[in-house]
Image (spheres, rainbow, N blue to C red):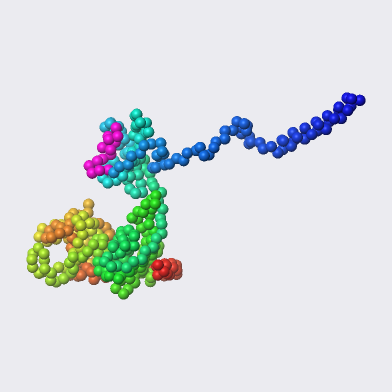
Amino acid sequence: MQKALNKKLWLPIVAVLAAAVVLAALFIPHGEEGDAPLDEVEITDSTEVEDITLKYGIPIDQYDVHYGIVEPGQNLSYLLARHGMSALQVHRLNKRAEGVFDVRKVRAGQAYATFHTCDSLNPRTEYLVYEESPRSYVVFDLRGDYNVYRGQYPVTWKEKSLKGTLNSSLWVAIQEQGASPLLALEMSNIFGWSIDFFGLQEGDEFRLIYRQEYVEDQALDSFHVLAASFRHADSTYYAIPFIQEGEELYYNEHGNSLEGAFLKAPLDYYRITSRFTNSRFHPVLKRRRAHHGVDYAAPTGTPVYATGNGRVIAKAYQANGGGNYVKIRHNSVYTTTYMHLSRFAKGLKVGDEVKQKQVIGYVGSTGLSTGPHLDYRVFENGKPINPLLIKSQPKKPVAPALMPQFTLLCDSLVHRLQSL
């Protein structure tokens, strides 16, 4: 009787325990196949993981970093020797650099950084990084067998706009707006076939929409003009970029290219000191004589451009006249001459074909001259004409089939310029 009673009591208990086991198997989470048991998993507190700060791709928190500027007369060998490398080690590193970076091109004024181990008793230099340009750098890895490689900074482009009025010069007007004055060169390059930038007037107005390149929030002097207008001498000139046949050019609001056969000036944005005339008092000869050209004052070494495509027909020196000069024939009608050059462009020779805006020489004061300047002359059918009055021949306009697309873009950009 007692055994039967005990059996009756245990049967429900066993049933409950069995049900509990089944429920546990169904609802308690299991790891995937191959996972470690829960009591063997190491839990890491994310607050204990330190952020790694990289510079040039190197964890700078692990090093004592020194920054410097390459001084005149210093080269890579000098910099490395200062940080304990022997002549043999420098030679090995130079060999490693072959095909990656020409160590002879380390220039004074460029920044560099050295990375040293944090061992206070015996610190070692493990990296030297040379800032090749605002966009790129060269890493000299001094560990082990050495390594040399290039790196690139990530760049971004930011859109900006600008509006101003001239009181003295375009250069100053842009500076007054807090922008890079090099935008003046951008505008003179774009409108150089339409506007005489040496004859700007007080009250002239410019408007500009552009993108500027940035590296690590540092603005670079690299621009892409998205639209521009310039009001000069009671006329407003527009520049609208448009791609045709794979080439982006700037066009006016009517779809005509702003690029002509000749530049308005053979150098970037400097002042005129003497104009075309049949009677000018010569500062050296102390008498009046014709001056059939335009003198542009500019520092010695300023690049001089060919104002149009053509062929070099003369490159010589005239002691009591033009000094070093270059003459270019552009076609059967026009020839241009560039005088008083300090030197010629490297490799330039008679017979060479040159392109518009190609550097052919550099401003100087050779020949009969009182100071550095360029004497620029234009001949039409062999007769000297005023370079400031020559008419540019426009390049191909927007094709008729593309005009609806261009008009839509132009209307939108002109509206944005007018709304500045």
Query: Which quadrant, please, contains the C terminus?
Result: bottom left
Indicate the position of residue 155 as horizontal and vertical percent values: 40, 51
340 and 245: which one is in front?
Answer: 340
Could one spot residue 366 in this view of the protein?
A: yes
Task: Read off the magenta span.
Answer: 70-85
Nearer the observer, 372 or 22: 22
Name the residue at the bottom extreme.
234
Q: Position of residue 173 (x, y in %)?
A: 30, 64
The reply to whether residue 381 is visible in this rendering is: no
Q: Position of residue 27 (x, y in %)?
A: 70, 39
114 to 182, vertically: above or below: above
Which quadrant: the N terminus?
top right
Q: Quadrant of residue 184?
A: bottom left
Q: Position of residue 409 (x, y in %)?
A: 43, 67
Query: Image quadrant of residue 284?
Result: bottom left
Q: In front here: 249 or 74? A: 74
Identify the image quadrant of residue 12: top right
**Which residue occupies the foreground of this view, 307 or 366?**
366
* Numbered-mark total: 0
Q: Residue at point 10% right, 60% down?
A: 320
Residue drawn at 34 percent across, 72 percent down? 236
371 to 393, vertically: above or below: above
At horizontal 88% and vertical 28% (from top left) the residue drawn is: 5
Q: Is residue 75 magenta?
A: yes
Viewed as shown, does residue 334 lie left or right of 257?
A: left
In the image, farthest residue toward the left: 286
Q: Residue at x 39, y 52 (%)?
A: 217
Q: Is residue 154 magenta?
A: no
